């Protein structure tokens, strides 16, 4: 969630000083950085969707039963979802550590966390002030403090004043205006 702050002009101005001279980043460069935020976001999103789907397929009730079937799955899903052909014999499963770290069909949670993060940030912090201490304390007390003691949707609904939505996420990705 904290990466949302780094795309706010006021925060970038505070963070971006030359390490020796203390000179701030030129305004034109700062504006260019903010405008370039959405470069390749579609490819990144498609990659996350691909990895999520791959994880779900591998942990389904009918998973691939051999190395050949795994390779076939990768060869089929990668171009179908990411629009990028899989190089012959390339099977990224060999380096996809999340599959072996107790995720068990939960990789999609990364993207879902981004949906919730965008909603939280846009709905409260962006509207009421990114450095607003009351909003920060509400977030701390209503979302972070209760943690996993209840349903996260209930915590977020209390904090947001409504159920979570994907609209802010779609806007943050440049998909909606």
Image (cartoon, rainbow, N blue to C red):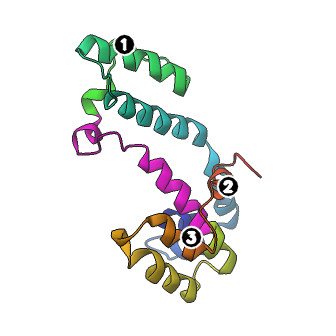
- Side of 29 where 159 appears, left or right: left
Read off the magenta span: 96-121
Query: Could you tell me how far apart the alpha carbons at marks 2 and 1 are, in whole angstroms?
Result: 35 Å
Residue at 38% x, 20% y: name it.
74
Q: Residue furthest right?
A: 177
Can the viewer see residue 25? no
> Toward the viewer: 92 or 105?
105
Dominant secondary structure of the residues highlighted in magenta in the image: helix
Residue 117 image point, x, y percent: 53, 62
Q: Mark 1 falls on what kind of element?
A: helix
Q: Which mark, residue 157?
A: 3
Q: Is residue 175 above or below residue 114?
A: above
Query: Magenta stretch: residue 106 in it?
Result: yes
Q: Which mark, residue 167?
A: 2
Residue at 64% x, 62% y: name it.
30
Q: Is residue 3 above or below residue 88?
A: below
Residue 127 image point, x, y percent: 69, 75
Query: Magenta stretch: residue 132 in it?
Result: no
Query: Could you tell me how far apart the alpha carbons at marks 3 and 2 are, in whole angstroms?
Result: 15 Å
- Side of 32 where 134 appears, left or right: left
| Structural crowding at the residue carrying mark 2, measured as other residues with C-alpha within 10 Å and reported as few (<14), some (14–19) or many (≥20) | some
Mark found first going from the N terminus, 3 or 1: 1
Q: Mark 3 falls on what kind of element?
A: helix
Residue at 54% x, 66% y: name it.
6
Mark found first going from the N terminus, 3 or 2: 3
- The residue that mark 1 highlights is 72
Res. 60 image quadrant: top left
| Structural crowding at the residue carrying mark 1, measured as other residues with C-alpha within 10 Å and reported as few (<14), some (14–19) or many (≥20) | some
In front: label 3 or label 1: 3
Mark found first going from the N terminus, 2 or 1: 1
- Side of 64 where 33 appears, left or right: right
| Structural crowding at the residue carrying mark 3, measured as other residues with C-alpha within 10 Å and reported as few (<14), some (14–19) or many (≥20) | some
């Amino acid at each position: 969630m904290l990466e949302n702050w780094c795309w706010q002009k006021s925060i970038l101005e505070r963070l971006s000083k030359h390490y020796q001279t203390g000179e701030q980043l030129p305004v034109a460069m700062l504006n260019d950085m903010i405008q370039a935020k959405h470069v390749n976001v579609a490819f990144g999103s498609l990659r996350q969707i691909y990895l999520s789907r791959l994880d779900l397929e591998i942990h389904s009730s009918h998973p691939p039963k051999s190395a050949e079937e795994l390779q076939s799955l990768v060869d089929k899903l990668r171009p179908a979802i990411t629009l990028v052909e899989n190089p012959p014999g390339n099977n990224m499963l060999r380096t996809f550590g999340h599959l072996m770290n107790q995720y068990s069909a939960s990789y999609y949670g990364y993207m879902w966390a981004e949906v919730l993060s965008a909603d939280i940030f846009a709905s409260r912090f962006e509207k009421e002030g990114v450095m607003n201490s009351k909003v920060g304390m509400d977030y701390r007390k209503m979302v972070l403090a209760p943690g996993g003691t209840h349903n996260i949707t209930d915590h977020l609904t209390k904090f947001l004043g409504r159920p979570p939505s994907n609209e802010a996420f779609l806007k943050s990705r440049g998909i909606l205006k």
